[in-house]
Image: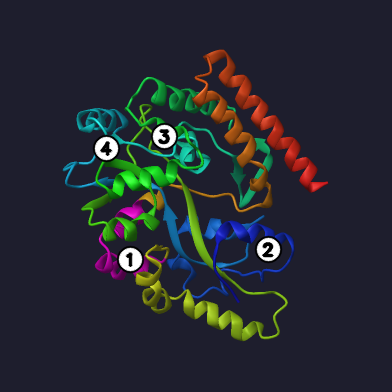
């Protein structure tokens, strides 16, 4: 038995035929699982694991600095501006990291791979569609027009995350985009933080983050498949998940575990709500070919303040490179 593992490992395990296939009938309490979590462990229409927990980016804020969190992007910009002074900032996030850019791209109707009937179409890459170009311009303008004001260090791709974490823990940052893994450090730092779903974008759409799932997988080559299947079904059951929630500090994907989760940590209600409007991270090997071309294009656009006429060209080149990388990896 493998796990809990990130669901985006499952595509590779499926391709290599290492992961045992499951059906709705062989997963105990299948109807209790969230739809997105099942999508996360499905490859080409076949289920290859049993999901346990989810995690997605949300708005994490210092409740002492922000009594009422923003519901819209304009509200966030306004509040952040009021809170920014000297070395204290109202809002910052790793603007050059694709995982953190994802909520904006999907919120502006862009996407990495088209998804239909349980299958990703690697020939349909949407990062350079109209929404993708709009997102690139939006992030560029966010930084250069200071809407909201963010420290220059957010452009240091390698160190931005640690810098922002430090600001939040020292109570010099009011709001950021982060995941549940930030809760223990903030608690230890004595920050009175809270969590809410990401604000809506200027187009009225919600921000749609990537969602990750932790899942259990059975080795298809194992010598005790029946026992392994039973073991995973127990770990992924309501009783099993309830035993693990506190240790993992991640939102369960079983509806029947929601009450136990919220009793342990009220923020789980918001983490679950955010995951429900997110998009599962593509779990296929081709995703490995996406990050670098996407990242290179966005670095050029944001850091260089690329003019509008170059934005589309840079995104087109990124998608062309992604397609070429995928073809080479598959050959």
Distance of label 1 from label 3 (alpha carbons)? 38 Å
Earlier along the polypeptide chain: callout 3 or callout 2? 2
Residue assigned mark 2: 13
Q: Is residue 209 above or below residue 255?
A: above
Distance of label 3 from label 2 (alpha carbons)? 38 Å
Give the mark toward the camera: 4 or 3: 3
Q: Are marks 2 and 1 in contact (CB under 8 Å)?
A: no
Q: Position of residue 58 (x, y in %)?
A: 36, 47
How many C-alpha atoms fall within 10 Å of the one at disc 1: few (<14), some, or many (≥20)?
some
Earlier along the polypeptide chain: callout 2 or callout 4? 2
Question: Regarding mark 4 in the picture, which secondary structure is present there?
Answer: loop
Earlier along the polypeptide chain: callout 1 or callout 4? 4
Give the mark toward the camera: 2 or 1: 2
Instruction: Tell me which corner region of the image, top left, top right, bottom left or bottom right, holds residue 198.
Output: top left
In the rendered structure, find residue 71 and report the number of the disc placed on it.
4
Residue assigned mark 1: 258
Q: Is residue 122 visible?
A: yes
Q: Residue at x 46, y 41 (%)?
A: 100
């Amino acid at each position: 038995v493998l796990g809990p593992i990130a669901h985006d490992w499952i595509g590779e395990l499926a391709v290599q035929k290492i992961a045992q296939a499951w059906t709705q009938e062989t997963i105990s309490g299948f109807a209790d699982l969230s739809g997105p979590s099942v999508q996360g462990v499905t490859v080409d229409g076949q289920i290859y694991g049993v999901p346990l927990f989810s995690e997605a980016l949300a708005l994490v804020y210092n409740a002492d600095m922000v009594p009422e969190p923003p519901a819209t992007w304009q509200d966030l910009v306004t509040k952040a501006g009021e809170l920014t002074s000297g070395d204290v900032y109202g809002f910052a996030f790793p603007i050059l990291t694709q995982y953190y850019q994802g909520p904006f791209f999907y919120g502006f109707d862009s996407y990495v791979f088209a998804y239909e009937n349980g299958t990703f179409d690697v020939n349909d890459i949407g990062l350079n569609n109209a929404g993708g170009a709009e997102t690139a311009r939006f992030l560029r303008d966010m930084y250069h027009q200071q809407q909201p004001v963010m420290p220059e260090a957010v452009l240091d791709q390698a160190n931005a995350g640690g810098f922002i974490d430090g600001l939040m823990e020292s109570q010099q940052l009011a709001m950021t985009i982060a995941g549940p893994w930030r809760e223990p450090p903030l608690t230890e730092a004595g920050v009175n933080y809270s969590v809410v779903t990401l604000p809506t974008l200027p187009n009225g759409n919600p921000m749609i983050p990537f969602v990750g799932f932790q899942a259990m997988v059975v080795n298809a080559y194992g010598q005790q498949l029946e026992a392994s299947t039973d073991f995973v079904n127990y770990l992924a059951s309501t009783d099993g998940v309830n035993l693990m929630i506190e240790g993992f500090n991640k939102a369960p994907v079983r509806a029947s575990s929601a009450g136990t989760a919220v009793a342990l940590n009220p923020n789980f209600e918001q983490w679950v709500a955010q995951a429900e409007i997110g998009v599962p991270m593509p779990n296929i090997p081709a995703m490995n070919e996406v990050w670098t071309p996407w990242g290179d294009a966005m670095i050029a656009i944001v850091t260089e303040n690329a003019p509008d006429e170059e934005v589309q060209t840079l995104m087109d080149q990124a998608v062309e490179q992604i397609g070429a990388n995928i073809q080479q990896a598959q050959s």
